[in-house]
């Protein structure tokens, strides 16, 4: 009996000691989570500008810096934060707090019946999802998380509250897709692309136009962005 009691006491002591020494699992950092989910990273390189971005129409062009032809996809304005789906067949953009599917081929659009209160910016859609229904990383006034354009559900990423620096980088458009950094520079009057820390390539430039929210297609061939005429503004 005493031997059994001794073994029980020893076992309990060892268990308590193990529990005290076992470290608690750490939360995944925001930047690492976004990179894993979307393949997009936030960067502090040349950080500038304000978190807000102008509204306008959705345009698309080649990303090679050679073909300067731009195709206008929407004509009713007030769009921002366009991003490609993983298969590059659709573009998801914000219009106010609502979401719109836009065809990159002919601009055909479909407004979703869902809205996300306080939404500020879209970062990118999930790269790999079962069932082929990716959610989009969305930044709201109070959180960052995954929004489903298929059912309107929003799942906050709780660790985002601990990383205000990454949040501000994302809001300012400091986003890198793989080894390509896209930026709206010269006070918004030009779009540039920079690969592997080489010299930036000016994709388009005009003193009469404001460019914003550039996003690269997953095949790396096309660029979607917001464009608005300064005279209209």
Image (cartoon, rainbow, N blue to C red):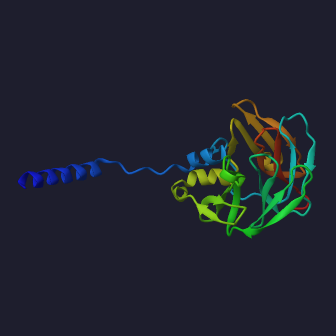
52 left or right, relative to 145: right
Q: Which residue shows up at 72% across the image and 39% down it? A: 181
Q: Position of residue 154 (x, y in %)?
A: 63, 64
Q: Name, please, the residue furthest toward the left.
A: 2
Whether residue 172 is visible to the viewer of this picture, yes or no, is no
Q: Is residue 51 above or below residue 34?
A: below
Vertical relation: 224 (above or below) 52: above
Task: Report the residue at 66% width, 43% height from top.
Answer: 39
Q: Position of residue 10 (x, y in %)?
A: 16, 50
Quarter holding residue 157: bottom right
**From this viewpoint, is residue 157 visible?**
yes
Q: Is residue 116 left or right of residue 63?
A: left
Residue at (68, 48) in percent of width and height: 48
User: Is 199 positioned to the left or the right of 145 in the image?
Assistant: right
User: Measured along the vertical axis of the image, is residue 27 above or below residue 140?
Assistant: above
The residue shown at (89%, 33%) is: 66
């Amino acid at each position: 009996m005493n031997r059994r009691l001794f073994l029980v006491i020893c076992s309990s002591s060892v268990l308590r000691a193990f529990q005290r020494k076992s470290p608690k699992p750490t939360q995944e950092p925001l930047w690492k989570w976004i990179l894993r989910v979307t393949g997009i990273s936030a960067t502090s390189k040349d950080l500038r500008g304000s978190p807000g971005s102008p509204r306008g129409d959705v345009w698309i062009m080649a990303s090679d810096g050679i073909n300067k032809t731009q195709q206008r996809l929407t004509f009713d304005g007030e769009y921002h934060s366009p991003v490609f789906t993983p298969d590059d067949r659709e573009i998801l953009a914000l219009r106010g707090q609502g979401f719109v599917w836009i065809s990159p081929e002919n601009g055909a659009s479909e407004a979703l019946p869902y809205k996300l209160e306080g939404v500020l910016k879209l970062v990118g859609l999930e790269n790999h999802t079962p069932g082929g229904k990716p959610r989009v990383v969305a930044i709201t006034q109070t959180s960052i998380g995954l929004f489903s354009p298929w059912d309107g559900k929003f799942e906050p990423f709780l660790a985002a509250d601990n990383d205000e620096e990454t949040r501000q980088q994302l809001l300012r458009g400091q986003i890198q897709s793989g080894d390509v950094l896209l930026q709206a520079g010269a006070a918004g009057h030009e779009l540039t692309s920079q690969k592997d820390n080489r010299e930036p390539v000016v994709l388009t430039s005009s003193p009469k136009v404001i460019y914003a929210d550039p996003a690269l297609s997953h095949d790396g061939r096309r660029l979607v962005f917001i464009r608005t005429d300064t005279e209209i503004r």
